[in-house]
Amino acid sequence: MTTVTPPRASQRPSARGPVGSTGRAPLRGPARASYRPLTQRLEVTFLPGLGEIVADEITERLAPARPPRPVPGREDALLVDHSGRLERALSLRTAVAVFLVLTFDVPRPKSLTSGEHLPRIADAMATSVRLGAARTFRFEAAGHDSSVFQRLAAELAHATGLVHDDAEGEVVVRFRRTPRNAPQPGASPARTDEAGWDVLVRLGGRPLSARPWRVADFPGAVNATIAAAIVRLVGDQAGDRVANLMCGSGTLLIERLLAGPAATAV
């Protein structure tokens, strides 16, 4: 895993260096007193059937101003308006992955190469690197091998210094038409049904479901997010006695101990 150190505020990113997560100078005096954290829209994906549990964990860990709500047309993703540090979103244990959602009022992906829109995508990709992704990226989109997406990939590679690896890139960038009735935070109601394009950048290097302690796949092992959901449903007490014998990879036991101490764990 490659660690990227963000440039100091006094440094201006080079044309090929990663775009910093913010170009603002530190706030001082009255400006700092009146500052309100920027609200960013996240899409949290999960396995079917875990929606309510994931929503509860999001509410508990991230404390969003409004409850998580389903992504229109999908049953495996929630939209979250998040105003805290993005690192906190990576602490979710029942979610598969977290994406930063950028919405653009453009008719087609070709328009995303403009100087108005490209820096926002590059900045989100640099944020993913800062949160642990390697310096490679790939697209997930219908027609990702078309000339339009190839040009966009070249422009983003130049802007960020990242390598476009269509097979194994760690910074995953998805594209889709903006779901109707899903405005960006702060958007006026009149714009709710206008269709544009969303660009979703996965935060961090791997899905949250890929636990760092799992160094090899074990056939038939329970998915870690399901194990974490079971732990949340059962609850955890310091006096618990936990047995997870002859059950493959021990995922349930590990997720239980990550949730809190137990009197006995076998």
Image (spheres, helix red, strand yellow):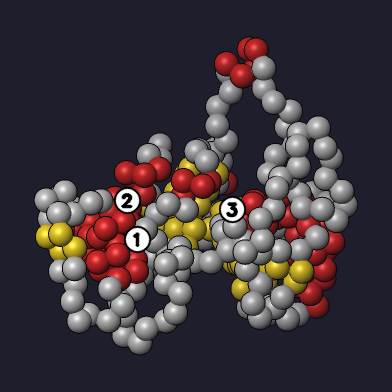
Query: Residue at (76%, 49%) from the top-left corner?
Result: 19
Whichever of labels 2 and 3 marks the residue nearer the N terminus, that label is 2
The residue shown at (49%, 66%) is 207
Which amino acid, by three-letter code, is at mark 2? Glu
Classify residue 38 as left or right of residue 43: right
User: In the image, residue 68 lies at what x, y percent?
Assistant: 38, 49
Q: In the displayed orientation, state which residue is furthest to the top.
A: 30
Q: Is residue 179 visible?
A: yes
Judge the density around disc 1: few (<14), some (14-19), many (≥20) Cα neighbours within 10 Å.
many
Residue 176's mark? none
Q: In the figure, 44 relative to 61: above or below?
A: below
Q: Residues at badges 2 and 1 in contact (C-beta under 8 Å)?
A: yes
Eye-nearest disc, 3 or 1? 3
Q: Amino acid at mark 1?
A: Thr
Q: CA distance from mark 2 to mark 3?
A: 21 Å
Residue at the (85%, 56%) spot, across then down: 16
Badge 2: residue crowd in 10 Å (few <14, some 14–19, many ≥20): some
Residue 265: name its quadrant: bottom left
The quarter in which the N terminus is drawn is bottom right
Q: Is residue 210 above or below residue 86?
A: below
The amino acid on which the numbered mark 3 sits, given as a three-letter code, is Leu
Which residue corresponds to mark 2?
57
- The answer to which of 77 and 6 lies nearer the viewer is 6
**Label 3, on which residue?**
131
Left or right of 174, for residue 135: right
The tag on residue 94 is 1
